[in-house]
Structures are given as structure tokens and as C-alpha cells.
Amino acid sequence: MPQTSWLHRVVLPVAAVTLGAALVPPASAGPAPGQRPQDSSADRAATDATRALSADPGEPGPYGTTSSHYSLDPVRVPNLPMPVELAGHVVAPTGAPGPRPLVLLLHGWHQSCYLPGTDQWQVAWPCPQGWEPLPSHLGYRYIQRLLASQGYVTVSIAANALNGQDTPGVQDSPDSNVTARAALVRRHLALWGRWAADPTSPWSGRVDMDEVTLVGHSRGGEAVNRVAIDVPASAPYAINGLVLIAPTDFGRQAAPNVSTVTLLGYCDGDLTGLEGQGYADVGRDLAGDSALRSSMLVMGANHNYFNTEWTPGPAAAFAEDDWRDPDDPVCGTDAPTRLSAAEQRKVAATYVAGAVRLHARRDNGVLPMFDGSTVRVPSAGEADVRSTAVGGRRQMIPVRQDVTVRTSGPMSARTCDGRSSGPEGVCGEGVQPERTPHWPVGDQSPYRPGPPALEVAWTGAAGSATLRLGEPLDLSGSTSVDARVIVGTATPRVRLGLRLQDADGASVVLEPRDEGRLRALPGRYPLGKLLAQTLRTPLTGVTEVDLTRITGVGVVSRTERGRIWLLDVAGRRPGLAPPSTSSVPVVGLMDVKEPEGSAADPQEVTLTLRTRGALREPTRVVVRAVEPAGNSVVRRTSVLLQPGEPTATFTVPYERDDRDDFPDTSKLNVLVFSTTGTVVTGDYAAVVTIRDDDPAPDVTVAPVDGTVVEGTDVRWRIGLSEPIDSFESIGWRVVRADGGLPQLRSDDVPARWLRSRGVTPPQRPVPLWQLDDLRGNVDFHEDRQQAVVRIPTREDDRAEGRELVALRFESERFLPEPLVRVAVVRDGSD
């Protein structure tokens, strides 16, 4: 078949873009959930174009391996009260000549302690007596052994002490302790830098600290990304790439100029929103950044099975499948599309090794694994792994809100805001956020938006939507045009053509790979992800348009109905881009601690943003202050950063007063996010701590009447000398009174009153102080400074003389020592 047989010359009339409500064509039938679609003969012919990779990175290398372990004195890291371990498991090659690249691996958050021989685990540090630290860092030995055989020195570091102090909702920090995890990684890298430079060290001459790849799983992925964002100039190491395995993305950050491969498990039951997609989306828009960023969707993979210590069977402790629905037709235990733990590890080892090879060796032979190509890697077995990529040698054309779009035929289009919910015009309108990895939650989210998109829907074949480019684009050096396209689940199969138009008005519709066929991702909520796929269109043999002056790029419908979102298109050039020499300024926040002051002081707190690196233009960042207890936003604003000014200040509201507060410290979490590619955030979360400096009020307690007549109430008045700014309680209970007189008894008070206090009246009268449950609390708040405790008494015909009743008052906050106050009850005839 001639090379040009897939070229179709067409003339397409154009009309202005239609902007408006979400475009939802009627649903059409698709494959049943969990079933692999039945390919037509054309489908099979297209799939046969998948080629095997010439160099399989999953194959063991020529070297033997040796394992060792180090454990040094614990170290302090930010935001944690106790030091954390400095320990690592090393697997290194034997007989490998010269200094070897270093690969450091960091696990994520997991239970820190387990009880051997049981299914019990917990989050604590240090582990209680009889419990053992859960060895999460040993869960990647299968990756370490493969890499070491290929000539890399590997170390997987322990973070159990960090996990044991990181209890969600109890001791967590505003950035989920990513700062602490990153600090731990830096301590290990500094340690290896010293060892490599020390001629007396066994690692001298064996480790190349200028070739470091960081691998992180879950929160470990976000932490190693943070390390790569802010590498000090004096650091004894250089980071050449990142591999992020099912990472969190609390900060919406990407490390500038660092090649990054992200593995996403489609059946991840922990991070169901596949937040790690954000690393490619944010990195795409960094100014002057040519780093390749790849997202690898591993169909059938969950979160835990990447780590053997989180996997049932090989784990030392109890472990479980994090996908909670065993009967799900796509991700359930017996689903045909679900990977076993062993199959998932084969994929992880192969693709991590491939990514390390790409980063450390800049090996073009493994590039097709990560650049949107359709390849088969034998070591990964039959796993379905799909890649999309941005950056590298691509000429990126991202969709912007102000883009000009022209449509024709039965096709409509609108640009939409990169959020999953919020005001009208968002991309994921009406879709659950767990299904929209590109688009964070809308107005309620403290995150920067995801990438805008062109939402396109059609009700017939041959419609088109074309992006009009501001400047002509030279595609003459590109081998293909790659488009990142999301397919809506209502029309699970679509077929598209790619339209190019040049500056002279000539146009051509090209046939993409696999005849332009794309399928929606399968499954029911939280599956059915709206996640981009690669629509690749070869440019070989194109003569109908002038590829040096392309002014329009668009899609053409080849099916009767469909709905897609177009994120970007790119001219793809072969090979890797040279390392970028540009730099992106890093913006960070610093914690604030200060006394409260008085009501006369300004009702706000000032914070400082610090910029490291040279700003090229004025840039705004978004700031949000959040009250952590209720997670309510107390301020949302933006701050303008100016070139030549390393700091900028802003304020957040705080109500200062002259009243005693509880707790003694108040906190606000302040978060900063970049909304453009001109800056990135480093330490993006700060804690404002305000220490109350108002004295606690004095407490007075006394009987209202020293002596009362039986049949009336015995009363004690409790008073605070000053109003307070919190809700507080002072506890009381009946105790034995000193004084040598008889004690007030249970039959001296009404039985119904005892029952109202939760006390069953005894059959035989006893002194009130012997009733253990006879106690209560008196509550105080900003509108209440005085209170009275009452004990009613009964009038009877017995001559009892004087009786004593004593109350003991206690308050850990207001009464350093308990107070006992005694009252006297006398007969009415006295």
C-alpha cells in the first residue's frame, strides 16, 4: 500500500465556534463492563501495527548483585515532634566498573507497626512493646534487584517513623508532611554524597552522584518531586529524572526541567482520582521547560501491589487489596482485565527500569515506551499499558480559553475551564471528580485548575473543529502530530481524522494511527475515567499542505456520534530533547509564629512569600488561608510577584482579643499555588501559629449560703473573673466533708434528682459522697461567667441535727489545685 494512501484531500466550509452548555450527544451501545471489546477486522489490522520494543529494560543485566543495610542515628525533619530513622536497604551491582548511577526509592504512607502472627497493624511511633516496624521500604526489592543487575546502585529508604507520626486528621500537616518526607530524602542524598567523596568509604568511586534518579510511591512520589523542585546549588548530587508510582499530588507541583515518568494504576482504590496525572499537566506549561513528562496508565493495576510489603502473601504484616469491590467487572478480583500481584510487579519493574534507563542513559531505544507510541515490551507480559506524553522535542499547542475555533458540519465545540465542578463552563460539569484526573474539584478546591480543553460533540460524520493558531507552526521536522484526547463515556467508541490547514488556505485530512479509533475507558463509578489518550497522526509523505506554515489544526468526525475533549496537540520530533538550561523561579512560604496581642492591634497576620530565581515578568500566585478544624477558607486572594523583588507580603485575617483562649495556640493553614508556568511553588504550605498571651481568669467557688434548711437547695456559685473566648467546663463531685459532723445522705435528697443524675437510689441510705457517679460539669463560654450548682434536699420528720455536704471542683485549665467547698444542712426545727 503506498504511503500516501491514508491521505484524504477535502474542502471544509467553516463557521464561528459555538460556545455554551456542555455538549452531550445521546448514548450508544458499547461493550459490557469488564469485557474486552470485540475488534473488527479493521481494528485487528490496526492493532497489528503495535511493535515489540527492540531493547527490553525488564530483562536482567549482566551483573551480579549484593544487598546490605544501613541504620544510623535518627534525624530531625520539619513538622514532626520526634526524630525519624536514617535507614536504607541497598542493592548494588558486583563487578560493575566505574561510578554507577544512583537510584533512590521512597515508599508512601502506610501503617507503621504490626503485631507478628496476627492481622493487627496500627499507626504509632515508636512501635509498642511486642510490635514490629512494618518494613515498607523492603517492598521494592524486586525493582532494586533488576536495576542493580543492570549496573545501578539502588537504595530504598525507610520512613516508618515519619508514617507513625503522620496520623490523618490528628497529626497531619497542611501539605500532608510532604516537606518532612522531602527533607528525609535530602538527608539520605547528602549522606551518599559524603560517602561517594570520602576515599575511606566503601562507596568511594562506585557511585555517580551527578546521575541520580528518584523513585517514589504514593506520598513518596510527591516527596521526591518536591526534592527535585528545589535542589540547592551546594548539593552534592544532581537529579536526572523522576519515576512516580501512583503518586499523590496535594500541591499541584511539577519539578522544572526534570524528566518525569508517572505510573497510574487504573484500579487504584486508594487514590481513585489518579491525581498523579497532574505532574504532566502542570509540567506542560512551565516556561522554557523541555523535559519529557509521561503518564503511563496501567490497566488492571491497583495501589498496593506495587509494594510487596503491602501485598497479601509476600508481606510480613497483614496486607490487602486496596480495590474494595471484589465483584467489580473491570477491577474486581476475578475480572479478566485485572492484573494479579505478580503481573503488576512485572509491569512495575519493567517500566521503572525503562524510565531509569531513559533518565540516566538518555537511551532513545526505550523512548517509545513513554512517548505515546504503541509498543509491546515482552517483560511486561500481556499487560495493557497506555502512554501519553508532553514536552520533550514536541512543539506543544495547548488549548487556551481565548483560543479561536472554527467548526463545520454537524459538530459543535466550546472551550471549557479545567475543573471537574464549579461555575458554568467547567470541563467536567456533572461528572464526579474521581473520574476526572485532569481536572481538580472546582471552587471548593485549594488547587490550581487543570488544563482547559476544547469540548467537541457531533451528531454526524465529516464535521470538523479546527484550532486557529496565532503564529504559523513549522511541522516540517516532525514525524507525527500527537493529540491528547479524552473520550466521553456516553459514546464509548469514536473515530477521528486530523485536519491541517496552511497559511495559503490549503487543507488536508489525515488518517491517524489505528484509523483514528479511540475508546472510552471502561467501568462504572469511580471508573470510566475521563483520561486522555494519544491520537497520533504520521506526517510522512504529506504534500497537500505546506508543513512549514501550518495555521490550523483540528479534528474531523468519522462516526455518527461522539463527544471528546481536546487538551493539546503537538508536533512530535524523534529523539530526546537536550537538557534545558532555563530555570523557573521557585516560590515558597514560611511559617509564622507570634503572640496574639490585644484587640487594639491589627486584626490580621502578615506572611511573606520568598522567590528564589529571577522572575522575568510580573506574576500572580493564588493564596488561600484555611481554618484547619473546620477546613473552612477564611481568605482567598492573589499576590503579585514583581521582577527584582525577592519577597512579597500579604495578610490573612485573624481576630485578636483580650480574652483567654483555648487552646493556647490557634492555627491557620496558608497555601500558595502557581496558576501560570512562570513560577513553581516549593514549600507551598505554611502554618500560622498565634499564641494566646491573655491570662487565664481567676475562679471563685463558694456556697451561696453557708447553712441551709432542709427542704431547700444547697447552692455553690462558681465565677470567672474575666470572660473567656472558648467553651470550657469545670467538673464537680460530692466528696467527704471534714468537720466531724454527719454527712448528708442519699435519703436526704429527692430520689428523682438522683435518677436525673444517672444514679440509682440505694436501698439503704449511704452518705452522698459514697455514690461514685454523683458528679457533673458546669459550662462556661464567652457569654457566661457565672454559674450555680444545686443539690436539692428533702424535708423530713427526723431530728438529724446538722449535716455536711462538700463538693470538689476541678479544672485542668483553670484550677491548678482542686477546690473543696463545704455547706451545712440543718433541720427546720433548729
Image: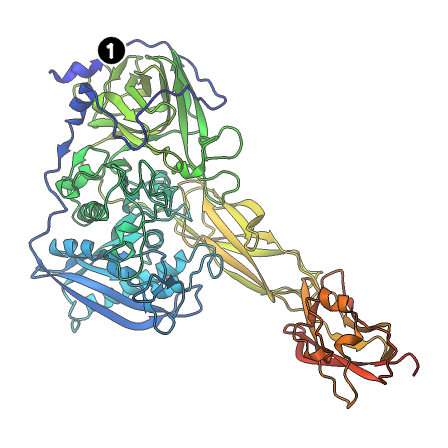
From the viewer's side, name the closer residue of 230 and 658. Answer: 658
Residue 562, horizontal then vertical, whole percent = 36, 20
Residue 144, horizontal then vertical, whole percent = 19, 56
Left/right placement of residue 226 relative to residue 798 reads: left
Count neighbours of disc 1 (C-alpha within 10 A) and say few if under 14, some if 14 to 19, many if 20 or more: few
* Residue reaching furthest to the front: 763
Left/right placement of residue 732 relative to residue 423 reads: right
Query: How many callouts does the rendering have?
Result: 1
From the viewer's side, name the closer residue of 749 and 72. Answer: 749
**704 in relation to 517, above or below:** below
Point out the image quarter for the C terminus.
Answer: bottom right
Residue 731, horizontal then vertical, whole percent = 68, 71
Q: Residue at x 34, y 45 (%)?
A: 323
Three-letter amino acid code at disc 1? Arg
Point out the image quarter for the N terminus.
Answer: top left
From the viewer's side, name the closer residue of 255 and 707. Answer: 707
Can residue 226 be seen at all in this image of the molecule? Answer: no
**666 in relation to 703, above or below:** above
From the viewer's side, name the closer residue of 604 and 267. Answer: 267
Where does label 1 land, which residue? 9
Left/right placement of residue 346 relative to residue 424 reads: left
SS of the residue under disc 1: loop
> Residue 523 appears in which quarter of the rendering?
top left
